[in-house]
Amino acid sequence: MTFKAEYIWIDGTEPTAKLRSKTKILGDDAKGAELPLWGFDGSSTNQAEGRTSDCVLRPVFSCPDPIRGGDDILVLCEVLDITLAPHPSNTRTALAEAAERFAAQEPVFGIEQEYTFFDGSRPLGFPEGGFPAPQGGYYCGVGADEIFGREIVEEHLDNCLTAGLGISGINAEVMPGQWEFQVGPLSPLQVADQLWVARWLLYRTAEGHGISATLDPKPVKGDWNGAGAHTNFSTRAMREGPEGYAAIITACEALGEGSRPMDHVKSYGAGIDDRLTGLHETAPWDAYSYGVGDRGASVRIPWQVERDGKGYIEDRRPNANVDPYVVTRLLIDTCCTALEKAGQV
Ligand code: ADP
Ligand code: MN
Ligand code: MN
Ligand code: MN
């Protein structure tokens, strides 16, 4: 019996890459074996010129396909050139190197992915030619006057669970039609690979309902919350007492040093200055701060973490459209380097 493998990859669209996928039919002999390399036309994905258009897909993560079911699978790939070197659009390679370098610190991530459903050109739940009642009642709400798209959200959650992804929760967000799911806690490559697959499943699940989902960080201008991807991070030293809290402070301080705030923010997703305004539960993009329980800070230390003297930190700056391979690499580079220097490993 043949089965279907949906090969998924990240394209070269600027400034924010898009997901692409196509289907490969594999034979029985492919079951349990290493999945084959494949190729695509990079001139159609902003990854090559027309005359040398071949790009290579190398499988890096696979899981059951919850939509097709049976023996069918989803296959996340990284993009290589025809010499099998990483393509310039491939941000996974650099994360793999950083994760390897700091593996002994056991970095762990949980990413909160916010997104917005659209029905045509309107956010789901927005009345034709106008606005719904102002923000206030929608976050974690219940009822048809507050909640839009729950059937899609539930289906997406079930699809992620059937696929075996490390999804850890969902909630309705502050703007109508806006939702969140969380992936993690997982290792750097696991959280990033699985977040990309969960995003693909989100688009694919919503597509079945004639609805689109977007990671636009500011889908509605004005007095409406943007969409972020809060990135929760810890190392073993931060998770374990009694020196855990000191390691947490080292990490928070390192993120504020010299050019670090700008180095991070400029790679935290296109349009970040539209979202990090200092309003709507954000800190201004050009002023770094951290604090306990402070949802107006760049980096929040959850209150239980201060109480317990150990745990994790939440970088609240990344946009919904951030590349998880990039945000995890930057956090590892900055924080694990500082922890190593301070001997807090
Ligand atoms: P918020 O209160 O900010 O909305 P959420 O419950 O949505 O928080 O998300 C918290 C995230 O933190 C989850 O994805 C969870 O997996 C992650 N998390 C919990 N503990 C750790 C840890 N020790 N290290 C990294 N991430 C963690
Ligand atoms: Mn959350
Ligand atoms: Mn949220
Ligand atoms: Mn959060």
Image: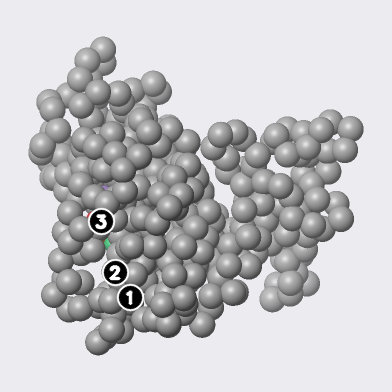
Q: Which mark is residue 290?
A: 3
- Report the residue marked by disc 2: 249
Identify the image quadrant of the C terminus. Answer: bottom left
The crowding category of the residue bearing disc 2, from other C-alpha atoms within 10 Å (few below 14, some 14 to 19, many at least 20), is: some
Instruction: Tell me the residue at 29%/55% (across/down).
Output: 299
- Residue, far bottom: 242
Examine the rendering and report whether any part of residue 168 can be seen: no
Q: Is residue 313 above or below residue 117?
A: below
Left or right of residue 251: residue 165 = right
Left or right: 314 in relation to 207: left
Amino acid type indicated by mark 3: Tyr
Q: CA distance from mark 3 to mark 1?
A: 14 Å
- Horizontal and vertical percent for residue 82? 85, 52
Q: CA distance from mark 2 to mark 1?
A: 5 Å
Instruction: Tell me the number on the disc at residue 247.
Output: 1
Q: Please give left or right for residue 36 compared with residue 76 in the image.
A: right
User: Helix or strand or loop: what does disc 2 sit on?
Assistant: helix
Q: Tell me the kind of residue under disc 1.
A: Ala
Q: Are marks 2 and 1 in contact (CB under 8 Å)?
A: yes
How many angstroms separate mark 2 from mark 3 (CA)?
9 Å
Mark 3, secondary structure of its residue? strand
Image position, residue 142 (x, y; %)? 13, 45
